[in-house]
Image (cartoon, helix red, strand yellow):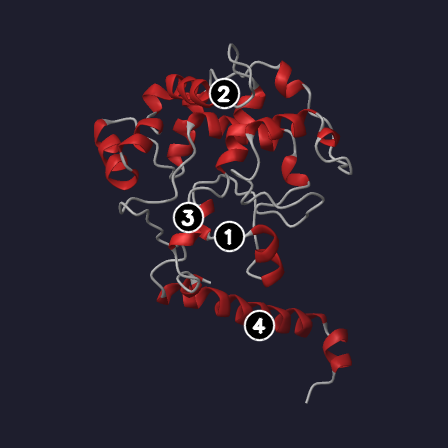
Amino acid sequence: MLKHESIETNAVLLIVLTLVAISIGGLVEIVPLFYIEGTIEDVKRADGKDAVRPYTPLEQVGRDIYIREGCYNCHSQMIRPFRDEALRYGHYSLAAESQYDHPFQWGSKRTGPDLARVGGKYSSSWHVKHLNKPKSVVPESIMPNYPWLLKTDLDFSDVQAKMKTLKKVGVPYSQTKEEYAANVEQFGEDVAKMLDVNHAESNLMAQEKAKNFDGIPDRITEMDALVAYLQVLGTMIDFSKHDETEFIEFR
């Protein structure tokens, strides 16, 4: 029987045994994937359409601002399947909720709270105040101020290019009539209209005008886009309509 010292002092043997251990671990992780139908949950709405959709143009631009400002450094977007996490944040995150994220924002560091289900938790005006001056709504906050978001007009001149790029990596934005029809079938007509690359700019302006996220009616600011993104997080799936054990088979 090999002694531990013999393995440590023999570089070739140590490398071989390390590779064997890694191979076994890798096979244990990879082989089961060939025997399951999928790792992304198929979550439907009451009308039979897909619950999880791609981001609208305004939400997508807001997500880019979220990444630009480094929000992911302090906030994760993944609720782990543990009781304490569920009590604080809600139902654990599903793979389906991140299927259109490039890159995903799971994270592992929480200087601030997890944001996977922050959508609808607070009003848009609360988010505006919080982003502009966090201490105005959370006195103990150590989050920095982001006053420029309200002062900076949103540049969305490249929103079509962004959507076309995401389309190349699998996000189902539509450019042709056939793709639009497929989105109507998958997500419903209202959602399909918002995913049409050909009308990206007008759709962005229409969503901002309807919701006026920043409270400024005559301008579209970066704050509008970022708050639109935050307000959609965790809102696509109504977990009250699903049984607790429904998604266990995907874990």
Tell which circle, 1 or 4, labels the residue nearer the N-terminal end: 4
Camera-near label (1 vs 4) is 1
Q: Which residue does the numbered mark 2 point to in the structure image?
A: 212
Amino acid type of the residue that numbered disc 4 sits on in the rendered structure: Val
Q: Which residue does the numbered mark 4 point to in the structure image?
A: 20
Q: Which residue does the numbered mark 1 point to in the structure image?
A: 93
Please identify the quarter of the rendering in which residue 170 is found.
top left
Q: Which residue extends farthest top?
A: 218
Q: CA distance from mark 4 to mark 3?
A: 45 Å
Q: CA distance from mark 4 to mark 2?
A: 58 Å
Q: CA distance from mark 3 to mark 2?
A: 24 Å
Look at 54% across and 34% down and name the residue there. 230
Element marked by disc 2: loop
Element marked by disc 1: loop
Please identify the quarter of the rendering in which residue 111 is found.
top right
CB-based contact (under 8 Å), mark 4 and mark 3 = no
Q: Which residue does the numbered mark 3 point to in the structure image?
A: 238
Q: Position of residue 65 (x, y in %)?
A: 58, 27
CB-based contact (under 8 Å), mark 1 and mark 4 = no
Tell which circle, 3 or 1, labels the residue nearer the N-terminal end: 1
Tell which circle, 4 or 3, labels the residue nearer the N-terminal end: 4
Tell which circle, 3 or 2, labels the residue nearer the N-terminal end: 2
